[in-house]
Amino acid sequence: MRYSMQYLKADSKTDIKFYLNGKLVQGMAEPRRLLVDFLRHDLGLTGTHVGCEHGVCGACTIRINGKATRSCLLYAVQMSGKTIETVEALGNNGKLNSLQRAFQKHHALQCGFCTPGILMSLTQLIEEEPDADEERIKDILTGHLCRCTGYENIILAALEVLGKEEGKNGV
Ligand code: FES
Ligand code: FES
């Protein structure tokens, strides 16, 4: 079977339209514009962080059609018709949601650089796997590098939201 690829000129901008945090967004992007740069620099949503830029650290994780995804590995022009959520979608009218409150309570962040990406991955886990246990939380965290907090408190926060805080070493 033959596949045909749409040809986009490097120096021309392409229309893109997608849902972002519940609102329809329309914009123009060069074919090489990374999604994370489009979110941060073109749309001003700086909650999504950029670390390694090659899919390792997890800082740029957002949700695309509900799935936690590295936004440094995609181009903005690939997003037409998609539904995207960034960390700015969490909480309600400036109030933290239960996962964010648990992070606060358990001191699950220090510098916060890794935090937006971790929150987005854990949000998917909590939604899709309400029975997830500590091992499953650790699986998810293998996709995220945190250089200053350590992972224990992040795990505690996730366990609390999953209703299993007491399962962690009797805490
Ligand atoms: Fe995307 Fe590190 S910036 S995974
Ligand atoms: Fe600093 Fe995770 S809180 S890198």
Image: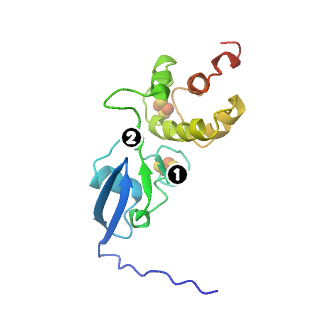
Q: Is residue 11 left or right of residue 132?
A: left
Q: Residue furthest top?
A: 170
Mark 2, ligand 1, within 8 Å: the answer is no
Q: Which mark is residue 89?
A: 2
- Mark 1 vs mark 2, foreground winner is 2
For residue 24, what is the image quadrant? Answer: bottom left
Q: Amino acid at mark 1?
A: Thr
- Give the residue drawn at x 39%, y 32%: 91
Closer to the chain start, of discs 1 and 2, is 1
From this view, report whether residue 78 is shown above or below residue 105. below
> CA separation, marks 1 and 2?
15 Å
From this view, report whether residue 102 is shown above or below residue 20. above
Q: Position of residue 88 (x, y in %)?
A: 37, 40
Q: Is residue 44 left or right of residue 32?
A: left
- Give the residue drawn at x 46%, y 53%: 71
Q: Amino acid at mark 2?
A: Ala
Image quarter hosting the C terminus: top right
From this view, report whether residue 128 is shown above or below residue 19. above
The residue wearing badge 1 is: 69
Q: Position of residue 59 (x, y in %)?
A: 48, 43
- Give the residue drawn at x 45%, y 21%: 104
Q: Looking at the image, can residue 120 be seen?
A: yes
Front one among 22 and 152: 22
Check disc 1: other Cα within 10 Å, few if <14, some if 14-19, many if 20+.
Answer: many
For label 2, the SS is: helix
Front one among 80 and 170: 80
Q: Looking at the image, can residue 109 be seen?
A: no
- Pointer 1 with pointer 2, Cβ within 8 A: no
Front one among 94 and 157: 94
